[in-house]
Image (tube, rainbow, N blue to C red):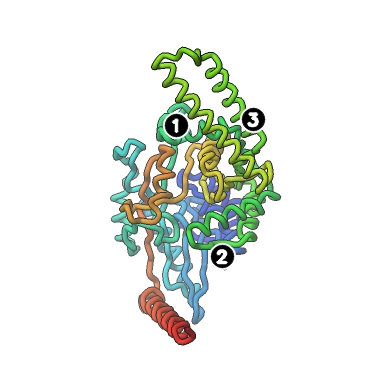
Amino acid sequence: MLKLTNINKEEFDNFVINHKKSHFLQSLSWGEFCKVKKNFTPYYLGLINENNEIVAATLLLQKNLPLNYCYFYAPRGYVIDYTKKDLLRTMTKKVVEFAKNKKAIFIKIDPDIIIKKYNYLNEEVPLTNNHETIFKTLQELGYKHLGFTKNFETMQPRYTFRIDLTQDLETIENAFSKTTKQRIQKAKKLDTEVIIGTKKDLKEFYHLMTLTENRKDFISYNEDYYETLYEIFNGNKNSKATLFLGKIHINKTIKALEKNLKIINDQISILPIDNLSKSAKAKLTELSKQKENILSEINKYQTYKKDYGNDITLSAHMIIEYGDKAWVLYAGNHNILSETYVNYNTYYEHLKYCKNNGIKIYDQFGTIGDLSKNNPRLGLHEFKKKFGGDYIEFMGEWDYVTNNFMYFIFTKLIPIYRNLVKKHSKKELENEIRNNK
């Protein structure tokens, strides 16, 4: 007889992290973070057999709603073998009973189950995960699929890029686009640097996040959000948050440019200026152009040094590690010196870091399925694609409805009402502005 019960947090996390379907969104750290910063109540539940062994588990996040109702969300689904239909049926039954006792309207899951995969050559990769059978099983058990969304409409991204870090580094690098390789090399030639930051660097990280978000015309989180995330994930032995800072030291960059300038001057000096052949004239023209470009670059960096100082952080990324997987959760970039391609080098360095530390799956955590040219997120997609990961599509969100009437109210009528209120408020504001002109 299987029973679902609250289990010890450490016992829960040890089960999750060792499961083949583990995900940081199912971790103890994420549950504790959601409790502090997202106004969820976390429950750490285990399905226990007669031998008191955990056979499945779930992080259930409770979100309170008006009128004493609530809903539950299991981020990236249950930690379970979805191919075991009887086990999934029992888990569903027990979770529904638990939810109904809390006056839940529905239970939302979004399993980390891949339904399509394309490699860096855009070739479809055959899957062996029985996703079609799992899809039918979830339907038979009463879950309602919410559709194959194409952008970021869901709680978690339905698409991502993942890199298999069990491959050797040369194979991984060969999958990078040509421009990515060139840009990483340029960042290195300019003597830029990528370091691992500490808690004191969170302020710099937040500054770059705000610059990035301002460019995209939205602001997501305050500084305390990132600080809390960093502290909670580094306060648990099973998880880790790491900051990577991509920096430029302008004096070093100028020295690197001056070194190249000397090489060019040396090449010019050996040309027979008084008796140039046609090919030598072409060579002199090319070298003179390179010299002019480098002098212009040196002048530009000297100006930036006056405005920003010698040491400038241009990129700051936060990586989450959990088990044998890592996720590029947040990335912020400065508005200046994008032509140094420090952002590319920062990605490259934390990818190598993950590989060297035994990470097997490197997840860029989110992209789009709508690849139309007018999609404002297409640039983000194309950037992540350049690193050669597998383009992955997940199954998507499912709701198990436990109160049909209230589900209709909260998911259909209330959103319509809110939209009407927004439109009315916008119209009133426009009228007020017009009348005050």
State whether residue 178 is above or below residue 338: above
Q: Is residue 127 above or below residue 30?
A: above
Please state which of residues 187 and 404 is positioned toward the viewer in this rendering: 187
Within 10 Å of the Cα at label 3, are there few (<14), some (14-19), or many (20+) other Cα atoms?
some
| Disc 1 to disc 2: CB gap under 8 Å | no
Query: Could you say whether the residue bearing mark 1 is in a helix, strand or loop?
Result: helix
Q: Is residue 31 left or right of residue 89?
A: right
Element marked by disc 3: helix
Q: Answer with mark 3 or mark 2, whichever residue precedes in sequence.
A: 2
| Res 227 seen here | yes
Vertical side of 17 occupied by 180: above or below: above
Q: Callout 2, which amino acid?
A: Lys
Residue 358 in sight from this viewpoint: no
Q: Which residue is mark 2?
A: 38
Instruction: Indicate the amino acid at tag 1.
Output: Ile
Distance CA(mark 1)–CA(mark 2): 36 Å
Q: Residue at x 41, y 63 (%)?
A: 93
Spatial CA span between label 1 and label 3 = 32 Å
Q: In the image, residue 429 lies at what x, y percent?
A: 46, 82
Q: Residue furthest right?
A: 200
Between 163 and 2, which is closer to the camera in this rendering?
A: 163
Pointer 1: what residue?
172
**Identity of the amino acid at label 3?**
Lys
Q: Which residue is mark 3?
A: 255
For image coordinates 48% across by 77% down, the residue present is 69
- Mark in front: 3 vs 2: 3
Q: In the image, which is nearer the foreground, mark 1 or mark 3?
A: 3
